[in-house]
């Protein structure tokens, strides 16, 4: 360090120590005030942005865009019902989704945050409000955690720490990504907390609490906790190299080892849940590989500015005042050179890592994600705000540093002016915030502006408090940009991406009908399709609808092969209204809904709901040894027949002339059209057109009925494709009702005489002497174990993708149970980690006593 800089820094340290001697309990009070103020300001601004965009709960417009409405809202509705004991399944198995799914894996992916327990405080018809409150609580907690971290790093004015905490919690990442993906917000909370764990490790403090914080972060959402852990490692590295308390190499190594111990023990404590989720991802339906393409640097720079939204570039907005302070750090001579160099280098390298494929893959655990490629951006936002705090904690930077930072900010804005992400609100909001922040600087006390000036003891109380007006202007600058940015992002998202309507009368009517008709486990009740997706999680029943990142590959493939459609590249199979499928999966009651008015963004939808009950085989049926002769082929019709064990379709070889298919079928049979990649309309002569929405690889169109074959037996199907016409080899099947009725009666007569279902078990009593294979109408996902009679349970067999148990004629019952894979391994790792934590605590107590 140059002598002049050393003198300035030493003088500043003397000033700080002298001021602290006159503060008394001020640091402790600040440590409480700043987090509380940050949380309150954050909650107010989030609600204000929601109100300005007229979004629920402060307006009539839905906020259920993309997966928020299709996935997270239904999961929280089911979570509430589960916690209150209102579901058929338990923590292991969800009977409602996908004909039986691994619920513990879904808990670890979507619902394991402590904040999610808040849903029980709300009635069932206010689940949207509950999810909004959960979201607001997580964001507010992130603000409080960051404010607490900042004051732990360096004493300073608590109002500034509170404003910077709010800037972190309401960054562009939060407003553009996290607010609509609630479980990622746990990573936002985790990053500053894990940085605190690093501080504790560096200073040899709290060796037991540290691993517990790590465990809580990884349990809450291990995906973003992984990113937060990497970010905390960067934080710790900089602190080890720049903080005075770890001046020697030995101290640095010891601090790093203590941090590694905390992380390893903490992850070990989370292993009982994390291992289950990890193994579930290994058998999940794979999504197409994504090749990372870095965003143009113009767009990257634009995302530092307010009112910008995109999923193709990193959301880096932290507010103009906070960004300006961060940009002054390299030039702020009141801060030690090693601190300036360390944090500047870290921020530059992390920024570059967003754009380089090897480090992009490192941030995302080796797999480039679909949809949003910059999910780790919240870490960079946090590092920027830490830099801003180091530059401002001892007072407003001196004019030279301010001028340099403002110049950099201007260059950034100028370079970003041509980006496609720039909104009409961007530069007006940016300019207004800059003016307000400049006014706040001018109103700050002279000692705070100089930063390095000596403070006399009798003037400490006055010098350490910013004028009220300066604080108000600073907060207003930050708050105004956040409110405008949140409003514009919500408005842009609703206009550019898919959305689901608010929960209302349609879902309530369907839920009432499901509750009245439910006969589980005698047979299933399928609620059909209600707007929003994941219907069974919202309204009840035991249908096929299921949307999860952990949707098992066997579930997706089995259902798709039988004519079911899907979205999200296979991870969202949907209900199939087909009598053969109903027989195969014991769907005895089916709901059908018809909207009474157009579905709109600004009003909950209404619909008429009808209920149909038909005889179906029981949940457990018996297939005889061998397989009856059925139509060969790989069409959905042939696969349904093989699983059913009977020929129920006539499969003509249609003749194609242009956009018309012609064939002949038995009079009175029902014409079904199967074209999973077809997008457009298909119409049987004399019937209304039926729409198909195939869009490979993301969307697969389901099997659909076109109408009844006329007395002549002639079938004519007119097609109106959108784009290239792609049809399978057997697109047409004519279902003969009498054949299906006969097959249903046979399976019912030979199937289970009684079925009992527990939370994750099924027991069925069979007719005496049953031989062949007992088939449980559930996809054979990993974790099923079954036994015939009193035999030992073994991993279940598969029969055309469903759970199967071989029968030799001696057993009169079968039993199956589901246990999520990884529980034993995770439990063993967790027990070892708990022992290590106990040993760590005992050693620490002994060291303290000595």
Image (spheres, rainbow, N blue to C red):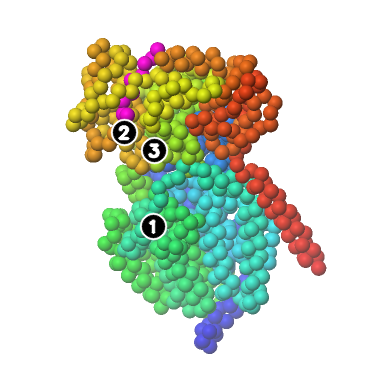
Q: Tell me: residue 687, above or below residue 190.
A: above
Alpha carbon of mark 1 to alpha carbon of mark 2: how far?
Answer: 33 Å
Is residue 730 inside the magenta stretch? yes
Q: Position of residue 260 (x, y in %)?
A: 63, 63
Circle 2 residue: 728
Q: Is residue 85 visible?
A: no
Q: Residues within 10 Å of mark 2 (few under 14, many from 20)?
A: few
Q: Which residues are magenta?
A: 728-738
User: Which residue lies at the image location 53% right of the left edge and 58% below the top edge?
Assistant: 228
User: Which residue lies at the image location 41% right of the left edge and 32% below the top edge?
Assistant: 561
- Disc sitting over residue 604 in the figure: none
Most foreground residue, 147 or 226: 226
> Which tag, 1 or 2, sits closer to the chain's start?
1
User: Which residue lies at the image location 46% right of the left edge and 63% below the top edge?
Assistant: 359
User: Which residue lies at the image location 37% right of the left edge and 20% below the top edge?
Assistant: 649
Alpha carbon of mark 1 to alpha carbon of mark 3: how far?
Answer: 23 Å
> Which tag, 1 or 3, sits closer to the chain's start?
1
Q: Tell me: residue 371, above or below residue 627.
A: below
Q: Position of residue 417 (x, y in %)?
A: 28, 63
Q: Tell me: residue 287, above or below residue 235.
A: above
Circle 3 residue: 567
Circle 1 residue: 292
């Amino acid at each position: 360090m140059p002598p002049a800089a050393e003198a300035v820094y030493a003088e500043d340290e003397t000033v700080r120590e002298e001021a602290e001697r006159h503060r008394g309990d001020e640091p402790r009070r600040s440590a409480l005030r700043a987090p509380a103020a940050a949380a309150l300001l954050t909650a107010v601004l989030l609600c204000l942005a929601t109100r300005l965009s007229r979004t629920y709960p402060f307006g009539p417009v839905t906020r259920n865009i993309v997966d928020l409405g299709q996935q997270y809202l239904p999961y929280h509705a089911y979570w509430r019902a589960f916690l209150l004991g209102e579901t058929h399944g338990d923590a292991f198995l969800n009977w409602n989704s996908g004909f039986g799914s691994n619920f513990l894996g879904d808990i670890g992916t979507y619902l394991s945050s402590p904040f999610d327990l808040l849903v029980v405080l709300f009635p069932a018809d206010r689940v949207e409000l509950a999810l909004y409150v959960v979201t607001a609580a997580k964001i507010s907690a992130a603000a409080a955690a960051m404010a607490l971290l900042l004051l732990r790093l360096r004493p300073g004015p608590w109002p500034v720490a509170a404003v910077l905490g709010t800037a972190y919690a309401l960054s562009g990442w939060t407003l553009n990504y996290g607010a609509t993906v609630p479980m990622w917000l746990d990573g936002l909370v985790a990053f500053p907390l894990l940085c605190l764990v690093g501080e504790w490790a560096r200073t040899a403090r709290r060796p037991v609490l540290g691993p517990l914080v790590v465990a809580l972060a990884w349990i809450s959402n291990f995906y973003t906790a992984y990113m937060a852990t990497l970010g905390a490692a960067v934080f710790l590295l900089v602190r080890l190299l720049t903080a005075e308390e770890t001046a020697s190499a030995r101290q640095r190594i010891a601090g790093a080892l203590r941090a590694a111990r905390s992380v390893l023990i903490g992850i070990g404590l989370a292993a009982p849940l994390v291992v289950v989720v990890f193994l579930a991802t290994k058998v999940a339906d794979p999504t197409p590989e994504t090749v990372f393409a870095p965003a143009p640097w113009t767009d990257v720079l634009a995302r530092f500015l307010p009112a910008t939204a995109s999923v193709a570039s990193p959301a880096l907005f932290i507010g103009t005042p906070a960004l300006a302070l961060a940009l002054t750090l390299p030039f702020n001579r009141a801060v030690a050179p090693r601190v300036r160099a360390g944090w500047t280098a870290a921020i530059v390298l992390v920024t570059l890592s967003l754009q380089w494929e090897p480090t992009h893959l490192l941030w995302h655990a080796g797999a480039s994600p679909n949809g949003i490629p910059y999910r780790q951006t919240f870490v960079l936002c946090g590092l920027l705000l830490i830099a801003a705090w180091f530059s401002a904690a001892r007072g407003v930077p001196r004019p030279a540093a301010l001028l340099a930072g403002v110049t950099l900010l201007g260059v950034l804005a100028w370079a970003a002016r041509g980006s496609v992400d720039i909104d009409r609100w961007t530069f007006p909001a940016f300019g207004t915030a800059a003016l307000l922040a400049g006014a706040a600087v001018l109103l700050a006390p002279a000692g705070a502006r100089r930063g390095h000036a000596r403070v006399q003891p009798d003037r400490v109380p006055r010098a350490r408090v910013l004028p009220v007006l300066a604080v108000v202007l600073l907060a207003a600058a930050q708050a105004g940009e956040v409110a405008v940015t949140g409003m514009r992002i919500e408005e842009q998202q609703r206009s550019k991406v898919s959305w689901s309507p608010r929960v209302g009368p349609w879902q309530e009517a369907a839920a009432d009908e499901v509750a009245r008709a439910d006969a589980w486990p005698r047979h299933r009740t399928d609620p059909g399709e209600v707007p929003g997706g994941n219907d069974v999680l919202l309204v009840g029943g035991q249908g096929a609808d299921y949307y999860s990142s952990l949707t098992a590959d066997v579930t997706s493939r089995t259902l798709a092969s039988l004519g079911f459609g899907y979205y999200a590249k296979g991870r969202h199979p949907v209900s199939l209204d087909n009598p053969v499928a109903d027989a195969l999966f014991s769907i005895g009651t089916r709901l059908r809904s018809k909207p009474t008015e157009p579905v709109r963004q600004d009003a909950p939808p209404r619909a008429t709901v009808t209920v149909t009950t038909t005889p179906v085989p029981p949940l457990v049926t018996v297939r005889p040894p061998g397989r009856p002769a059925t139509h060969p082929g790989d069409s959905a019709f042939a696969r349904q027949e093989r699983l059913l064990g009977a020929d129920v379709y006539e499969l003509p070889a249609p003749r194609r002339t242009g956009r018309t298919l012609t064939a002949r079928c038995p009079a009175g049979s029902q014409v079904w059209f199967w074209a999973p990649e077809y997008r457009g309309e298909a119409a049987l002569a004399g019937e209304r057109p039926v729409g198909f929405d195939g869009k490979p690889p993301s969307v697969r169109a389901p099997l659909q009925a076109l109408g009844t074959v006329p007395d002549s037996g002639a079938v004519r199907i007119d097609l109106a494709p959108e784009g290239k016409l792609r049809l399978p080899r057997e697109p047409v099947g004519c279902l003969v009702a009498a054949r299906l009725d006969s097959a249903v009666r046979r399976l019912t007569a030979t199937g289970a005489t009684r079925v009992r279902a527990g939370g994750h078990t099924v027991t069925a009593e069979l007719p005496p002497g049953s031989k062949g294979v007992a088939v449980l109408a559930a996809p054979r996902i990993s974790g099923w174990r079954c036994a015939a009679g009193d035999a030992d349970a073994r991993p279940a067999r598969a029969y055309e993708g469903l759970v199967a148990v071989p029968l030799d004629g001696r057993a009169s019952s079968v039993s199956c149970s589901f246990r999520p894979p990884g529980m034993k391994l995770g439990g063993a790792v967790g027990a070892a980690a708990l022992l290590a934590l106990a040993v760590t605590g005992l050693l620490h107590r002994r060291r303290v006593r000595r």
